[in-house]
Amino acid sequence: SSRANGVVPFHGPSSHRTPAEWIMDEYVDSLVAFLKEQEGDQCLLANLFAEVPRPPGVTTKAKKILLKHSDMFALEKQADGHYNVHAIDRQAHHFDNASLRYMFRALFSVHSYYATISWPRKFSQWKTDYTNGMGLDPDTASGVYNMLHVEGYVKKDGGKLVWNVPRIHDAINQMPDAIKAMPLEGSSSSPTLAARGASIVVEESAPAIQSNTRSGGAGRSSSRSRMEVWTLKDGTQCTFVNSESSLLQCISNDPILQASGDDQTFVAIDCEGVPEALELIQVATPRGVYIFDCKVIGEETVCLALEPLLISPTHVKLMHDLHKDAVAIDKFSQIALKGTLDTQLVGESVWGEVFLGFNGLLTKLELPQHPSKDFVHAKMKSGVDLFAERPIPPSYLEYAALDVSLLLQAAPPLQEMLAGPTLTNLIQASDSRAVSAAANDGARAICFDIADDYKIASADLLRTMRPNDGFYGEELVIQNETDEVVSLLPNHLRKKLVPKPEQDMLFGILALPSNDSNEEEEKTTVPLDRLSDITLDIGRRPQCWINDERVFLCDDESKLVSSDDIKSVARKLGEFGSDNRAGLDGKLHRFSAMRNRNGDISGITVRIGRNVLGNAAMLMDLLVGTEKSILILGEPGSGKTTIVREATRQLAKSKNVIVV
């Protein structure tokens, strides 16, 4: 058993064993040590005994040695008939725990299903195989996975599932026949597994929960190993959970956390450390406040345990400005929130305040304010991660508890205020916001309310409530017309500005290297979509500008711009005006000439003009909704004229505007 726990026992001459037994134990220890050095603690049977040959005096066949020490090795027969050997750390399989029997019965089916195909690497694939491949109840997929995770049969590493195959084999080998024969019609066959697999009975008794009362009327138990329970000033019971068994026990004891029942129920949810991390998830139900320590238990473990609640449409989840919370939950568990009610959207719908703060909401509902909200927010904005260190200070835990406790108090007045379809629409808008936030790294989707003088509005809300009143902007479309400019240049200056045809590139790959040392080929071409300027000055190397970086149009330093090059370009352009500028009919490109004392053109600079549709959308509230003037500042080439051009195009749609 000491070897099974990762400790190599000491076997000396004084042991009460024969020399042959002593040699065998030492050899088995060598086999284990070799397997532990291999990827996944496994290798082929033939390779194992080739690398660690049997010592003199050991005549037992290789396979028999492993079977005799089944507490340390697991044999897996592959499709080609060869055996793979796993080193296992024997752990107890809790077959006598009634609440886990459904999981073990499901594991038996799972093991049979994946006997000939690869184990799933993604949770979505697991759910698909569980339902379609094995024909099991889809509502139990998350619960079974969660229990398998808690029991050490699977874990998640870097977003991928990692199955402990040796431990699974060991469990199958020891599994009682009574469990293997259990029916698997669905969750009803296991009273300890709720409809969505979240109600898991943990036989471990709950820890002591009451202790001395701290200042402020909050009592907390001294143990921090599993659960702490204390009471807020208003009598709300708070439970801090930082172990997997306590997590499952809380879910088992509160039907709301299991999302059981079809009646509409309100809860409050908030997260800390988001979106980069997910350190805490707080949930307030009518029974009290739960604070789940995701950093200790595991982000995915907590989210999957709460998944039935997080996706239940009948359990309305009050959240205030859910953008970052949605990102973190999706990031660590790939769960898309459903049945949410973002109270910030409520504030916008009822009072017209797009960025209504949490205390602002409580004030409008005539509820007590969060006493430390502003202070804690100020510390967070300064870069301090209040919830990263363990143990978490009691004051921070009470801050987290008040977030959801006070938010849940908003449920009754909101229910009275948002009766009928209004509540349904706001829930739909909130779910849309959660999806958008997760897809766009927490960015807020805004638009302009045409019916309200183009004031800023939340796109998710307006699309749901009044879709025809929103100005949502347009997809940016860059009209890039550089061919006309390139055609004006002499042929030897165009090489980098004209990408080679695909067939030329193919022949270039297939052709043999040339021995002609005089052959001239440009090494690179210029990305025309990022070309901003071309500068031609007599006696200097021709150059252009890409992303504020200078690129020479000829790699040969001896090739300089000649007077003939300048005359060729000027002749194609036609006459320059008195301001030494010229252009192309119907195009936005600008050509500027520099003259010498004799009045002859000695240099030409080309500014590439582009029309970018949609880049003035963020100005629409000021352009159309007010009479204010707009000053646009920016460096040369940063796009000032492009924005002005698009702004005038937008104005021409609704105003009597003539663009000259």
Image (cartoon, rainbow, N blue to C red):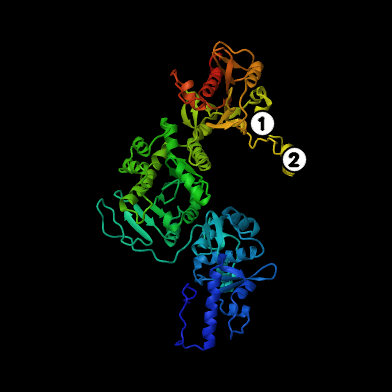
Q: Determine the residue positioned at 67% across, 71% down.
A: 82
Label 1 sits on residue:
495
Are the two marked residues, 2 and 1, in contact with CB atoms closer than 8 angstroms? no
Label 2 sits on residue:
507
Q: Please, which residue is most extreme toward the left here?
A: 215
* Sequence-wise first label, 2 or 1: 1
Q: Amino acid at mark 1?
A: Lys
Nearest to the observer: residue 656 or residue 564: 564
Q: Determine the residue positioned at 48% across, 48% down.
A: 329
Counting the numbered discs, the total is: 2
| Secondary structure at numbered mark 2 | helix
Residue 356 image position (x, y, % from top left): 39, 35
Distance of mark 2 from mark 1, alpha carbons?
18 Å
Crowding at dot 1, Cα within 10 Å, few <14 / some 14-19 / many 20+, comes out as some
Residue 567 image position (x, y, % from top left): 64, 18
Q: Amino acid at mark 2?
A: Phe
Classify residue 394 as left or right of residue 449.
left
Nearest to the observer: residue 486 or residue 106: 486
Residue 342 image position (x, y, % from top left): 45, 40
